[in-house]
Amino acid sequence: MATTQETPIVSPVGRDTPRVDGPRKVSGLAQYTSDFHFPGMLYAVPVEATIANGKVVKLDTAAAEKMPGVRAIFHRQNIGKMYRSVLEPGFESVCEERRPPFEDDVVRYYGQYIALAVADTFETAKAAADAVRATYAKDKPNVENDLKAEDEPNVVATTFGPYERLESQRGDATGAFASAPVKLDQTYVTPAETHNPLELHATTAIWEGSTLTMYESSQGVVNQQGVLAQMFGLPKENVRVITKFVGSGFGSKLWPWTQCPLAAAAARQLGKPVKLVLSRKMMFQSVGHRARTQQRVRLGATPDGKLVSLQHDYVYHRSMLDAHHEDCGEATSFQYSVPNLRVTFGRAKRHVGSACDMRGPGAVPGLYATEAAMNELAAQLRIDPLRLRVMNEPKIDEGLGIPFSSRHQLECFELGAQKFGWSRRTPGVGSMTRDGLTLGWGMAGAAWIAARFPAEASVQLHDDGSARVACGTQDIGTGMYTILAQLASAEAEADDVAVIRFTPIAASGKGGNWLSITPSGNGCCNTPTNITVSANASALTPGTYVGEINVFQFANPGESMTIPVVLNVSP
Amino acid sequence: MHTFEFIRPADAAEAVAAAAQAKTAQQGADVRFVAGGTTLLDLMKLNVETPARLIDINRLPLDKVEATPDGSLKIGATVRNSDLAHHPTVQRDYAVLSQALLAGASAQLRNMATTSGNLLQRTRCMYFRDTAMPCNKREPGTGCPAITGSNRTLAVLGTSEHCIATNPSDMCVAMAALEATIHVQGPKGSRAIPIGDFYLLPGSTPNRETVLEPGDLVTHVTLPALRSGSKQVYLKLRDRASYEFALASAAVVITIAGGNVTHARIALGGVGTKPWRSPEAEAALTGKPANAANFRKAAEAAMRDAKPQSENKFKIELARRCLAHALQLATTS
């Protein structure tokens, strides 16, 4: 029985540290995106297409527009200009559904937004959205489950840039398979899966002149800033995306979806903050999913279990306009030692919303197929599936012909087998029972890339001993606030990651410095303090002005808060 | 959701009077009683139910579980599913009902859902619940896309060419096996309806699911006393282990003497257009030795008239195995 060695950890990094945002989360004080409210805020509810393929030929909005409290029913004619965004260098401005909402009258998937109701209350907006009547010219949608690769060139465009369909190749996979003493040829299918995190996708858009602020349920605020700046023709610095907490995303909140520009466009047209929260039903349709995959795996082996050929040819579905790449072959080229290998992919267009990354994108469904094939080969050879893998463990990354930076698969297998009691396994179906139940024990290996991207952060050290860490990022639930506090504490050789001190700062948008607070700034508030808020409208023309008061807790950023201030100046 | 009038009557008579002018008590009702609301409010949000008047019966004195002088058990209309499931008498004497209730929905839903609401629970057929789709049950005459569409979870017993929607209840399956009686107070007085007469097959009017008429208020359900020594089991098979509707379920109430089945009451869930009592399975068992071969024969008798659709043929064998296994569990426990 292995034991964990207890080593006292001196650095705040690696030390057992309570989440700095824990109290806020368990007490309900943590503000998730849909919790933010702004004076004068309007509510938007999209109208979803109820066909998967065809055209909107008529949109009857008359009944909806007449409802008391309805501010607008937006559609292609009145939503205003939005541009199509493009991928930028450095993997920036990623977006899985590039077509701006309402760009044309074509419906390409069930649930595509065809109109947007905006009203004073959510209930009115929902009733108005339900009252919009669409007439369609319907075509039969292609939602066929069986996937056949479409005829495409070797290099294809994807959401993430160009990819070669011949993903990896060495030796003569086809020839070696043909002459292999033992063969396995199987096709594995994984269904489309939706993320459906607990927190619904939510967005609130606020315009001040040509500056757009979005409160967003986002796993990538900087990326969204880039996409929205492009879509509204703004410099990046005019777009601010704020995510305080995320109630999980699983990949569906990595890149902005069409409700984000819709809320921003509606807010622009109406001159009011607009909030748009998806329904649970919409979460199955318009914010991505893991693509369905169909993967043919062919293994050739010697009778004693040495792999001689591996072919992994997979097909996944894509939406009509976009091309998320589900890289099922990511781990195939290096996972096992085999002299002859070929990995290819193909794609099949379907009338579905765009796919996107989901929890171990690509490699996870891919490894399901190749590892299931290894298990079937082991059964065919009557070899223990663990032994089959050990026999085929590579010494180097044979796909790239370079050493692994880290591997550890054999240690994983050894430790896992020991902890599980693998030696007690009997392979016959139904041969193992416990408490009247039939047991089945199986195993699989896995590999995952270690990817990292450049990021920027700034740290201010204050003479009161506190530090302020700033980084354009978000906490997706994995503890970003705590991690940053730990990192800063470690670097500053500080010991305490939860000093209670706060610094209030007032900021106003357009109209100059009409908002002020006293006291404010560094060192003002080391104990509970009353803050006086003043607004000076004397130099302002009639209109709406938005500012905010930021209360920073430098050593405890999860406790920091932003208090929006809206000033209405009447003529 | 449409706007509606909300009424909170002082007593059952007032509730009945407030509902008596309704055009129908079936699909499309302009007046609905609301208790737990776990089905009705969902369907109102989906615009599947659009009542102009809601009558709240939660404050009526219908929330008791009581023994009656004739030995039966009287269960009030607004008794919560969770309270009923954990009632000591139910746990002791009507275990199949307790098991069925606890197999249904989630703890939160069971805390709200009531006896009468569960009796009138609506189908989960996705075409019924989506107003963008045709549905003979929701809008008579528009057609049934489920028959040529997605029907994996739908019924194989009691279907018609107009509707194949499954009754989703677990509680009602147990009550069918327990031969419950449903007590109704209506504009013309009170009446008692055996559960076997309460539900209608879809036929050509799938919008009509029960014999209830405008103003009819379910006040309580009675369960008859059971013969001593009866064994009871509710077995539910589903796609995941909790918070999921049955693909097939079986409620078994069985008495054995000297190795022979002397009395059997059997009902199936997840496979029928109503809670499916099976006199065929009961007849196949009664008087026979309680063994695996006879359990299998009873299961085959129960599914003899089953009619599969394109995606749900598996349910027929699943239901057979479910019933045979339930009988095995009941007689070996």
Image: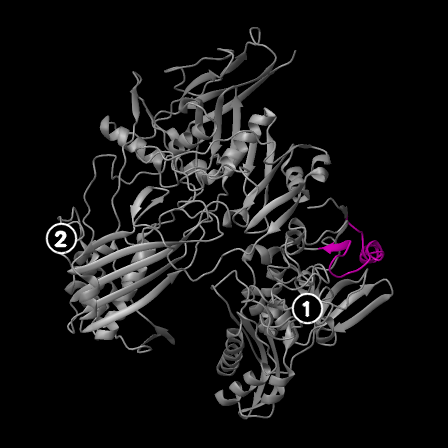
Residue most extreme to the right:
B188
Residue drawn at point x = 61 percent, y = 66 percent: B169
| Image label count | 2
Q: Is B194 left, or right, of A210 in this rendering?
A: right
Front residue of B244 and A249: A249
Range of magenta residues: B7-34
**In which chain is the residue bearing label 2?**
A
Quarter residue B260 falls in? bottom right
Q: Which residue is mark 2?
A: A396
Residue drawn at point x = 62 percent, y = 75 percent: B157
Q: Secondary structure at mark 1?
A: loop
Q: Which residue is mark 1?
A: B162
Q: Where residue B38 appears, x then y in whole percent?
A: 63, 55
Q: Where residue A135 appears, x then y in whole percent?
A: 65, 47
Q: Where residue B84 appears, x then y in whole percent?
A: 62, 64
Residue type pointed to by label 2: Ile
